[in-house]
Image: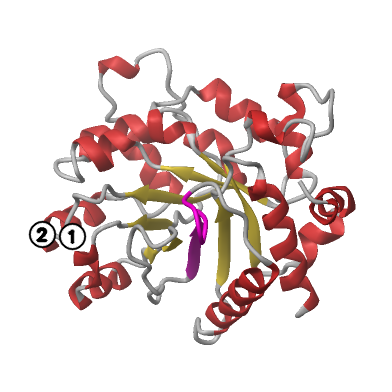
Amino acid sequence: MSTDRDASARDASAHDRAAAGSFRVGTSGWRYRSWRGDFYPTGLVQRAELTYLAERMPTVELNGSFYSLQRPQSYLRWRAAVPDDFVFAVKGSRYISHMLRLRDARAALANFFSSGLLALGPTLGPILWQLPERQRFEPDVLASFLDVLPRTTHEALALAREHDERMTGRTWLEDDVDRPLRYAIEPRSESFADPAARRLLDEHGVALTVADTAGRWPQFEPGTAAFVYVRLHGAAELYASGYTAEELALWAHRCRHWARTGGADERDVFVYFDNDARGYAPHDALALTRLLREAL
């Protein structure tokens, strides 16, 4: 890694985290071997990696929830490792998005919400549904799925109590303050360019994810949801290439534009770097944060 990128990790501070205002920039996941001895100092124990990251950026995307249902103890441990103002974006279960393909999802959603998400409390941020490329826009299917999504944590708790017997003994069925829930969908089929798809998402206040995927999948513009969700998987090589200074400046410009197009209030903009294979993600996240801070 270059000297400039090494310095970006060393120079990050709590001021960097707070100064971004309505912008929250982080990474997709945090546990990567290639980050050790680079973004993470040599000798940093693995259990301290999330805390180290959270001292330098204000958000991270939880990936494990996509592959399998996590346990409440894990969510509690993650929450305890970060500051109170930190935000976890949570990837929705691939069983729902890839196996059920959003159909008849109520029972699976009950299990998902009972698995411990609510234990994150105020650190629970947007919930992302990443769709497979084969998942085409089907108006009735998408509408039915969006209708069943709980809109607040109390609604999520009520749904979670419908969990099936497989979740017995591994649920979290508590919630203190009723908080709104926010959702983003990342489609990978060109069929979602249909204006009807955007209208449906806008009607439900669900963000259409802006994804940079080295040209592999379509890149959509965000809709009118109250926040913007961006995933940067790599401009030149999927999951692997770093972003140039010029590319980061362009993304900073776009983020500032999207924040200002939210009507009377500025929209929150969440950005997650998923170009983690060679360790670029955390350095690019810190560099973009600095660009956004400098524009304030």
Query: Across the whole image, how many numbered discs are drawn on residues?
Result: 2
Q: Is residue 83 among the parts visible in the rendering?
A: no
At x 48%, y 22%, the residue is 71
- Residue at the far top: name it: 169
- Residue 264 sits inside the magenta stretch: no
In-image side of 162 versus 8 (left or right): left
- Residue 233 sits inside the magenta stretch: yes
* Gap between marks 2 and 1 measured at Cα: 5 Å
| The quarter of the displayed image where residue 217 is located | bottom left
What residue is shown with label 1?
A: 143
Q: Residues within 10 Å of mark 2 (few under 14, many from 20)?
A: few
Q: Is residue 203 among the parts visible in the rendering?
A: yes
Please tell me whether mark 2 sits on a helix, a strand or a loop. Answer: helix
At x 12%, y 59%, the residue is 138
Query: For the magenta stretch, what is the residue range?
Result: 227-238
Residue 64's x, y, as percent? 48, 31
Quarter of the image where the C terminus is located? bottom right
What residue is shown with label 2?
A: 140
